[in-house]
Amino acid sequence: MKSLHAQHHALADTSYQLTVLSEAEAAGARLPAFAHKLRESGLLPLRPTELAVMQVNVGKMCNQTCRHCHVDAGPDRTEIMTRATMQLCLDALAQTTIPVVDLTGGAPEMNPDFRWFVEQISALGRQAIVRCNLTIIVANPKYHDLPEFFARHRVRVVSSLPHFSAARTDAQRGEGVFGRSIRALRMLNAVGYGVEGSGLLLDLVYNPSGAFLPGNQAGLEREFKQRLLREHEVVFNNLLAITNLPISRFMEYLLESGNYESYMEKLVAAYNPVAAANVMCRSTLSIGWDGQLYDCDFNQQLDLNVAQNAPQHIRSFNAAALQDRAIVINQHCYGCTAGAGSSCGGATA
């Protein structure tokens, strides 16, 4: 499967995605503006709290082309962060006490300077998180030592595994992905990841395979742990349940399946003001592969930069100015505030 970008699909144009989202808002009372909901909750304008996470997308290149990928990543994407831009991120990080750097892609490990970047983050005494798709570890011999590299730098590994069954995982992420993921999980377990007392954190990410919200995170975690241990002798620490946001490839799925409007209605109906108060954009700064600044990874994929009164690029990083900004919102934000809430760290309420 090719990325939307490679297909020259209409949805590869973020302005078209934003048009689709705005048309949903224009539908009226059933799909009110997200700003209206925030105003009712006393949260408009939405403002940052303490900056706790620098999330860096180091490139859109990936060894997989997953059906619901909000980044539209894949082997045909060539956008990649340079070492010079990584250095700008490190320079900005050194000015702050931000404790966590969250590395995303694509498959972040495919960036040729990925290991250098992790080493530099570690040298600054910050916690690195890598969003690992698991299959990259077994994709090529040059990646086979990634578990040892991660362990050496105490990297927290957060990996997508849509389900504990091969059929549902492969349907979302590609044929054979489940089997390769299990092999990679066992390699991570072998060096201590997910093993009690090791201090090496291995978290899995669950997202629904269709047009519905994730179930209870704690219940899903129990079931995943039981099934993966019993059937595959795999252990992990936490399960993070994430809602699919109606953008990019998931928007394509919703539109093609005729579920778009009903899914948006579900998100609106499930709006939770507690989740809205705890959205990740309040404590996270998202940095694109080219150094552009965004409020979150989802805004990044829609080319919605931070507010104009704030620095637009990491080279102009200014913590005080970024703290004083209003967070940019749109209709897709309903996905982070529905039900128990959703973030890169799982449920928020």
Image (spheres, rainbow, N blue to C red):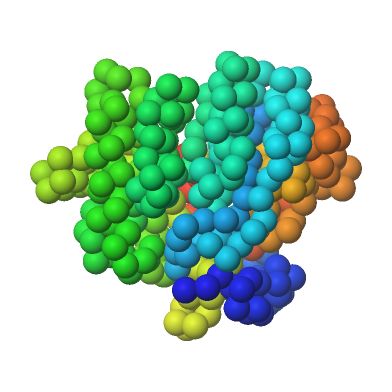
Q: Is residue 172 left or right of residue 8?
A: left
Q: Residue at the right extreme? A: 309
Q: How many marks?
A: 0
Residue 172 in which image quadrant: bottom left
- Estimate the x, y position of residue 236 in percent, counting from the top left: 28, 36
Which residue is at 59% across, 45% downward?
Answer: 111
- Estimate the x, y position of residue 264 in percent, counting from the top left: 53, 69
Which residue is at 61% across, 62% downward?
Answer: 77
Q: Residue at the front extreme? A: 141
Which residue is at 34% across, 56% downward?
Answer: 162
- Estimate the x, y position of residue 224 in percent, counting from the top left: 23, 46
Q: Quadrant of the C terminus?
A: top left
Q: Is residue 106 visible?
A: yes
Q: Is residue 302 left or right of residue 138?
A: right
In the image, is residue 309 above or below residue 35? above
Front residue of 25 and 136: 136
Front residue of 41 and 306: 306
Front residue of 92 and 51: 92
Q: Is residue 140 left or right of residue 282?
A: left
- Estimate the x, y position of residue 171 in percent, counting from the top left: 33, 69
Q: Residue at the left extreme? A: 230
Residue 50 in which image quadrant: top right
Front residue of 294 and 25: 294
Which residue is at 51% across, 43% downward?
Answer: 109
Q: Is residue 134 visible?
A: no
